[in-house]
Image (cartoon, rainbow, N blue to C red):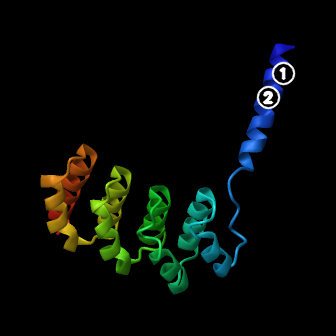
Amino acid sequence: MKRHILLVVLLVGTLSLSGCGPRVSGFSENQLSQAMAQQQNQHERMAAALELGRRGGQQSAAILMQYVNDPNPDVQIKVMHALAVYMYDRKAAPAIEQQMFSPHESVARKAISCIKHLDYSSAVPDLKRLRDTSTMPGVVRAAQNAIVYFRRHG
C-alpha cells in the first residue's frame, strides 16, 4: 500500500513539474517586451529574456539591451546569456563588460563568460583589473581564465 501511494505521489509530482514555469513561446515580441517589465514575475521575466534571445533580431536585441543593468541578478544573467549565447550580439559586449564589476558574483562571472564567448578582447584591461582587485575568488579565477583564453586565442 505504501509503495502504491509513493508511486502515485511521484507520478503526480513529475506531471505537475513538467508543466510548471511560465510559457512565453507563443508571445508576440510586444508581449515579451511587456513580460520583461520589472513589475512582472521574476520567472516570467527570465523566460521572456531567453525567448527573445532565441528569436533574435534587432527588435529583440533592443528590448534585451534595456535590461542588461536590471536590478534582479537572475534576470540580468538571463539577459546576458540571451544576448551573448543565443544571439551572439557583439554590439552588446561593452554593456556586458560593465557587468563584470557587479557586486553579485554570479552576475560578474556570467559577464566574464559572455565576454569570452563573444571573443571581446577589448575587455582584457578590465579583466586584469578584476583579477588584481576583486575580493570575490570566483571572479578572480574567471578573470584569470579569460585573460589566459585571450592570450592563447590572440
Indicate the quadrant containing the C terminus: top left, top right, bottom left or bottom right: bottom left
Residue at image location 18% in from the left, 57% down from the top: 130
Q: Is residue 105 left or right of residue 134?
A: right
Task: Tell which of 138 and 136 is nearer to you.
Answer: 136
Residue lying at the far front of the rendered structure: 39
Report x, y in % for residue 14. 74, 38
Indicate which disc residue 34 carries: none
Q: Looking at the picture, how far across and down is residue 64, in whole percent?
A: 49, 75
Task: Label 2: state its secondary structure.
Answer: helix
Amino acid carrying mark 1 in the image:
Ile
Q: Say which amino acid is labelled 2.
A: Val
Relative to 57, residue 96 above or below: above
Label 2 close to label 1 by CB (< 8 Å): yes
> Counting other residues with Cα less than 10 Å from the Cα at mark 2, is it few (<14), some (14-19), or many (20 or more)?
few
Please identify the quarter of the rendering in which residue 38 is found.
bottom right
Task: Pick the quarter of the image with the N terminus.
Answer: top right
Q: Is residue 26 left or right of residue 140?
A: right
Name the residue tied to disc 2: 9
* Residue at the (68%, 66%) spot, across then down: 24
Which residue is the site of mark 1?
5
The answer to whether residue 42 is above or below residue 59 is above
For the view shown, which residue lies furthest in the right direction? 1
In-front residue for pair 19/100: 100
